[in-house]
């Protein structure tokens, strides 16, 4: 990774050599795909008779299918190549292929051969297939962990903007150019520009240079999916991404007919819908970095899925029941109707929450995939994305063919989205727990963090902290990017409502020896097991929530834990929670709602790791007291 200075925002990445050339390369590639694909669709739609006897509806669906077939056939190979060879060199070779493809397209236009043009479209699909694993696997090699959210946000935004602008450019070229070969010439210029940009991409060495490439797409696809399934969170993230592409593609595919037959707009209104959705995706993606504090925050994923469901359902009710008078209307007339603005708001919100949903999932896959298998896991993601989109298109076509209206199709998709979300969050509660923690510190509190980098990104450690309130585990979890197994009093563990959260956090209940020695021994055994498996364990050494605001003496349990399993001990100090709704100041906790108002400031400070042999209760209490200071 480069030693360039840390960017102040995600946009500063566009000024760095380790990101900007790659961004331009991938943007131009996505732009070119959509320029040629849409130009071809427009030509086949409005001039089909001069090319073939097939109906335009058949041709457009045939073109879409031909473009996506390579994702099934060659994604597995593409993933292997990206793990075996330098990704920067692969990017340049893919750009060379893109220029050759534009030559094939030009030949097809000059020969007036639909077969050659569809062959060029197939090759463009191959181009996208080969670049896919490079596109996402290269980011963790060139960006720091705290830049990955911003980098992925820029890539997602750039991709959707490229789709929008490329689609518009393709349509304009197909309709305005004197000869359709100008489309291929424009594509060749774009490919050449991408090739030149690719020379600026820094080297991204192969993680597995000795990999033997298996050309069998069936066995290798299954193997790649097997790599993804080794980490449950990664695999379910892939399923979540694939569902999003099904959901988004379903909406995008209906825009032309929806604009004409539901809203009553003309051809330009399709662009209005696509642009509105694209702006929403871009803004949602860009906001991810700010809302997540420059680190992956999977709590945004449930937030995104809630928005995708709510605004998908609202689109059903926002859609007009009948065409307006004078349809088809120009954009200016369409915008004069109040129901149009509600539809546009819903599409914007769908894009916005789609950005919240998709960006953290991509970053999570990049971070939690084994580096030597990352490109092949991303290839598996691309295969499942394509499969989900094809299945979604077939199901949508069948439902619409049986008389279902487009607004009702949107509503059914939104309801299924809710079911899919609940299913995934049930299998991996970490998503929902992160959402609860994220919501807590963005609605009730404003959390200031300091020294969090002392918490290791991998490997076992014990976190110890002062105990001020019932939400201490959630506050600490919101600042830590890894799951934490908290050890807590069994009575708190079993409290109504919050017990659901603590159970899904895999908290470890403990009781004093005089009360339940069996439970106490079981708790210490589970702590040892968790540390042996490389997990983080959280301890509140006071053994109780303070009712004075001051420290209770730290107990000796921490010495037993690190004596049995020697691991680093990270001291933490919570600040500002004393006197909050969840603390015991002036009586029982949670008895005086919002007594400090909303967005009250709290803090969490982490200190340097303490060696296990130095982790005495007295020394640790001194460290935590110094970290907390006078701010209770």
Image (spheres, grey):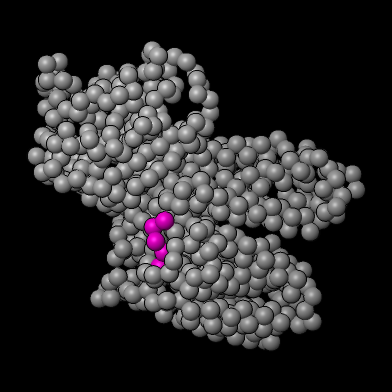
At x 70% / y 83%, what residue is drawn? Answer: 181
Task: Identify the image quadrant of the C terminus.
Answer: top left
Q: Residue at x 53, y 43 (%)?
A: 304
Above or below, comparing residue 359 to residue 95 in the picture: above
Rendered view: 456 above or below 189: above
Residue depicted at x 70% and y 71%: 170
Question: What x and y, as percent, mark residue 509?
Answer: 23, 26
Per the picture, the main secondary structure of the magenta-coloured stretch is: helix
Pick whichever, 230 or 219, lies toward us: 230
Q: In the depicted view, which residue is nearer to us: 630 or 37?
A: 630
Is 587 or 171 nearer to us in this picture? 587
Query: In x, y percent, where is residue 298?
Result: 43, 45
* Relative depth, front residue between 192 and 323: 192
Q: Is residue 399 above or below residue 577?
A: below
Query: How many marks can you see?
Result: 0
Q: Quadrant of residue 586?
A: top left
Residues drawn in magenta: 142-146
Q: Position of residue 480 (x, y in %)?
A: 35, 43
Residue 425 visible from this viewpoint = no
For image coordinates 17% across by 37% down, the residue present is 619
Residue at the limit of the structure toward the front, as seen here: 630
Q: Could you say where residue 313 lies in the image, as x and y percent from the top left? A: 63, 37
């Amino acid at each position: 990774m480069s030693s360039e200075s840390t960017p102040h925002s995600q946009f500063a990445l566009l000024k760095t050599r380790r990101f900007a050339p790659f961004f331009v390369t991938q943007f131009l590639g996505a732009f070119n795909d959509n320029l040629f694909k849409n130009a071809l669709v427009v030509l086949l739609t409005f001039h089909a008779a001069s090319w073939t006897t097939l109906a335009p509806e058949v041709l457009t669906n045939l073109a879409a299918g031909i473009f996506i077939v390579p994702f099934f056939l060659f994604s597995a190979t593409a993933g292997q190549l990206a793990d075996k060879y330098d990704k920067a060199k692969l990017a340049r070779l893919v750009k060379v292929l893109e220029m050759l493809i534009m030559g094939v397209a030009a030949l097809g236009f000059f020969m007036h051969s639909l077969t050659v043009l569809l062959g060029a479209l197939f090759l463009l699909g191959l181009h996208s297939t080969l670049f896919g694993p490079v596109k996402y696997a290269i980011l963790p090699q060139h960006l720091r962990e705290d830049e990955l959210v911003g980098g992925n946000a820029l890539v997602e935004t750039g991709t959707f903007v490229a789709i929008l602008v490329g689609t518009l450019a393709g349509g304009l070229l197909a309709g305005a150019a004197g000869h359709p070969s100008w489309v291929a010439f424009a594509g060749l210029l774009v490919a050449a520009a991408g090739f030149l940009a690719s020379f600026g991409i820094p080297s991204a060495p192969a993680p597995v240079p000795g990999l033997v490439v298996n050309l069998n797409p069936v066995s290798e696809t299954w193997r790649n999916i097997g790599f993804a399934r080794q980490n449950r969170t990664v695999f379910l993230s892939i399923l979540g991404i694939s569902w999003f592409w099904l959901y988004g593609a379903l909406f995008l595919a209906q825009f032309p007919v929806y604009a004409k037959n539901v809203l009553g707009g003309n051809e330009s209104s399709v662009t209005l819908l696509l642009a509105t959705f694209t702006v929403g995706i871009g803004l949602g993606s860009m906001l991810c970095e700010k809302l997540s504090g420059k680190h992956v925050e999977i709590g945004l994923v449930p937030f995104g899925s809630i928005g995708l469901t709510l605004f998908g359902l609202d689109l059903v009710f926002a859609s007009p029941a009948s065409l307006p008078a004078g349809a088809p209307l120009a954009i200016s007339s369409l915008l004069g109707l109040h129901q149009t603005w509600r539809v546009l708001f819903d599409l914007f919100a769908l894009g916005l929450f789609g950005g919240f949903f998709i960006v953290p999932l991509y970053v999570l896959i990049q971070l939690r995939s084994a580096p030597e298998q990352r490109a092949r896991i991303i290839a598996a993601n691309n295969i499942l994305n394509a499969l989900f989109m094809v299945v979604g298109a077939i199901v949508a076509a069948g439902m619409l063919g049986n008389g279902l209206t487009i607004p009702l199709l949107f509503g059914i998709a939104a309801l299924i989205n809710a079911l899919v979300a609940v299913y995934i969050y049930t299998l991996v509660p970490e998503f929902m727990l992160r959402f609860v923690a994220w919501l807590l510190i963005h609605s009730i509190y404003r959390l200031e963090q300091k020294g969090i980098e002392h918490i290791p990104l991998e490997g076992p450690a014990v976190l110890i902290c002062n105990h001020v309130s019932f939400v201490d585990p959630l506050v600490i979890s919101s600042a830590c990017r890894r799951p934490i197994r908290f050890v807590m009093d069994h009575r708190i563990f079993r409290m109504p409502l919050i017990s659901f959260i603590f159970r899904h956090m895999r908290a470890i209940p403990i009781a004093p020896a005089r009360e339940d020695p069996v439970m106490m021994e079981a708790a210490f055994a589970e702590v040892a097991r968790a540390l042996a498996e490389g997990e983080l364990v959280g301890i509140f050494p006071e053994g109780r929530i303070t009712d004075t605001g001051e420290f209770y003496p730290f107990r000796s349990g921490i010495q037993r834990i690190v004596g049995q399993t020697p691991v680093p001990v990270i001291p933490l100090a919570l600040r500002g929670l004393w006197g909050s709704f969840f603390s015991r100041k002036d009586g029982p906790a949670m008895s005086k709602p919002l007594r400090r108002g909303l967005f009250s400031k709290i803090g969490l400070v982490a200190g340097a790791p303490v060696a296990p042999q130095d982790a005495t209760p007295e020394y640790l209490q001194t460290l935590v007291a110094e970290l907390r200071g006078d701010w209770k």
